[in-house]
Amino acid sequence: MLVEKTSERWYEEQRKYFSIEMNGYRNPPELQYASILPLIDRDGKVLDAGCGNGMLLKFLMEFSGHNIVPFGIDTWDEAIEQAKTEVARIRSQLY
């Protein structure tokens, strides 16, 4: 329950970073993101190909319960620049 309440607050705080242009979603994709969490079962590297502005990586880092080393790649420079600004902890690993 604590994770649900915490993630609800996270989605509200991050809502402004979700758009069709930047990451393909009009609103935070709560069910999609939550469905990925069980797949992260240990510390390690995660690659998000087509990461947009990096919100999925940020979510996984904050809620997986593991030490995630995030890597993101996207063809749209503007989205990557937003990811580098808004997701400062993963700045050097976004291309």
Image (cartoon, helix red, strand yellow):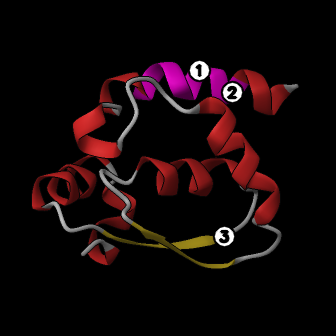
Residue 62, relative to residue 2: is it above or below? below
Element type at marker 1? helix
The image quarter in which residue 4 lies:
top right
Residue at point 82% right, 27% down? 2
For residue 87, side relative to residue 41 (left or right): left
Q: CA distance from mark 3 to mark 2?
A: 18 Å
Residue 71 percent coordinates (x, y) = 43, 75
For residue 4, side relative to residue 55 (left or right): right
For disc 2, the marked residue is 6
Residue 87 percent coordinates (x, y) = 34, 52
Q: Magenta part mainly helix, strand or loop?
A: helix
Labelled disc at residue 67: 3
Q: Are marks 2 and 1 in contact (CB under 8 Å)?
A: yes
For disc 1, the marked residue is 9
Q: CA distance from mark 2 to mark 1?
A: 5 Å
Taking the magenta stretch, the answer to whether it contains residue 11 is: yes
